[in-house]
Amino acid sequence: MKNDLGTQSQILLDISKPRRRTFVSQLQVHTIPMLMLLPFMLLFLVFLVYPVLKSLFLSFTDYNAVREPSFVGLQNYSEILHDPRFYKALQNTSIYTFSSVILTNIIGLGLAMAFGSQRVLDQILRGIFFLPAVAGGIAIATVWKWILSSEDYGLLNTIIGWFGFESVSWLGMPKYAVPVLIMYTVWNGLGYSMILFVSNLRSIPNELYEAAAIDGASPWDRFVKITVPLLRPTFIYTTVTGIIGAFQVFSEPYIFFADVHNVGGILDSGLTVVTYLFEKGFYRFQMGEASAVAWILFAICFVLTLINLRVQRANESVQ
């Protein structure tokens, strides 16, 4: 009897011990998953990792896409940081980014609160507001170029002409360049922002509002002290992705303002950082400087994202 108990306990100890897998057994377990991941890893290395590392190398070289690149150190970065056109592009992009992100968040939240219910009319309106986010960006920008055209066929000037106003060169006057980009981006992106806020608003329990109402809180107090804090994850997401996307804007300013000689429009009023990069690389074939602009843009987006996340965490710790 004693020997049987000893045998059983030994069996239990053997079972409880973790079995050491040999190299061969681990290879048998992981071979098939690794083979299935291999195509993706190859595409990832060829089309993402290699171009990124290649652009970092080219940013330190003098390269015109024809002759072999020659190492010039930090000369490309120095020339860009001493170029007034780069600061003009950075100024336009900064104004465009912060204005469009703030307006998209505010208007998107307003639409979500106004049309966030399950009524049929609200569902139809949400679909209408979301349509620009589904349509292709280049196609929509081309339509807007027709709407804003100062020619006889321009839709907006035709409409304001019916009321006796003179035609306006919306895309030809420097003071309208950045506001036109902001207006287009807000119109195009508020539907997507609205949908995110609607989903977040529905996750807030009604019991919180009912308890606050019983305690005498006004609608404004309930919005500021309940709705806004609980919408923080959506605010963080829309702000961070909005900043990164806005700093990379290219197709809209290119379609609106570019011609065969200049991509920034009159007096570079519509020049952005990416169109400046495009001009360096594909108008002037200064690939080294274009790569340096790309890495400066990456550094700007990286720093702004870190600042935004730090500010959001600081607000969370205070509350």
Image (cartoon, grey):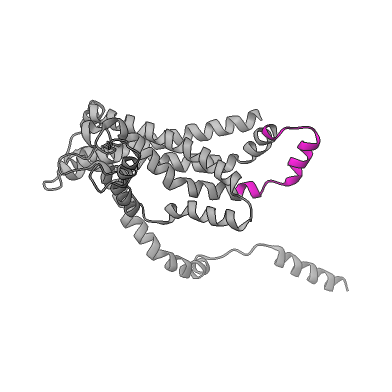
Task: Tell me if I can see residue 290 in this picture.
Answer: yes
Q: Where is residue 174 in the image (x, y as percent from the top left)?
A: 27, 31
Quadrant in which the N terminus appears: bottom right
The outermost residue toward the right is 1
Q: Which residue is drawn at 31% across and 33% down?
A: 176
Let me know if residue 213 is in the magenta part.
Answer: yes
Residue in front for this viewpoint, 73 or 99: 99
Residue 232 screen position, x and y as percent: 59, 39
For residue 184, which quarter of the picture?
top left
In this rendering, would 261 be left or right of 174? left
Percent coordinates x, y for residue 36 in the rendering: 44, 68
Q: Residue at x 23, y 26 (%)?
A: 84
Which quadrant of the figure has residue 62? top left
Work out whether residue 295 or residue 271 is closer to the camera in this orientation and state it.
271
Residue 216: in magenta span: yes
Taking the image as shown, residue 151 lies to the left or right of residue 198, namely left
Image quadrant for the C terminus?
Answer: top right
State whether residue 245 appears in this view.
no
Q: Residue drawn at (65%, 50%), measured in percent from left and top?
A: 202
Residue drawn at x 52%, y 43% is 108
Q: Is residue 247 above or below residue 131?
A: above
63 left or right of 270 in image: left
Q: Say which of 71 and 160 sits in front.
A: 160
Q: Which segment is the magenta one?
A: 200-220
